[in-house]
Amino acid sequence: MAYTLKAHMPGLVARVVVNVGDKVEAGQELAVINCMKTEMSCQTEQGGTVKEILVAEWDEMEVGTPMIVLDD
């Protein structure tokens, strides 16, 4: 079953630190959101393989915006 990392705060995507096909572990940082000049790490709750990256640097995020999809 796929897992989707969603933005946990509003802001801009500062960077995406994974690529499609990367294997990741639970708790690993996948992206960083810049909110009011503060960088906040976006970490996955599940491990898996990066299937799709839905955002790019400087995309504007709202809470709950899908960012990265993982496959088991």
Image: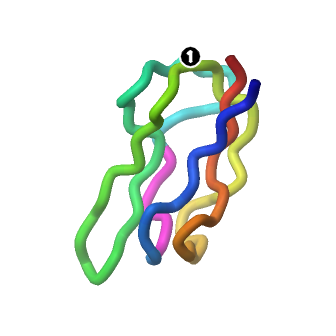
**Colouring method of the image:** rainbow
Q: Amino acid at mark 1?
A: Lys
Range shown magenta = 12-16
| Residue 42 x %, y % | 41, 49
Q: Which residue is mark 1?
A: 23
Q: Is residue 46 above or below residue 13?
A: above
Residue 26 in the image: above or below residue 7: above
Would you say 30 lies left or right of 1 here? left
Residue under the image location 69 percent in, 39 percent down: 69
> Where residue 41 sits: x, y (%)?
33, 51
Left or right: where does residue 9 sit relative to residue 63? Answer: left
Please tell me in which quadrant of the rendered image residue 34 appears. bottom left
> Is residue 14 in the magenta section?
yes
20 over 43 or under it: above or below: above
Residue lying at the far front of the rendered structure: 1
Q: Which residue does the image show at 63% across and 65% down from the upper left? A: 65
Where, quadrant-wise, is the N terminus in this rendering? Answer: top right
State which quarter of the image contains the C terminus: top right
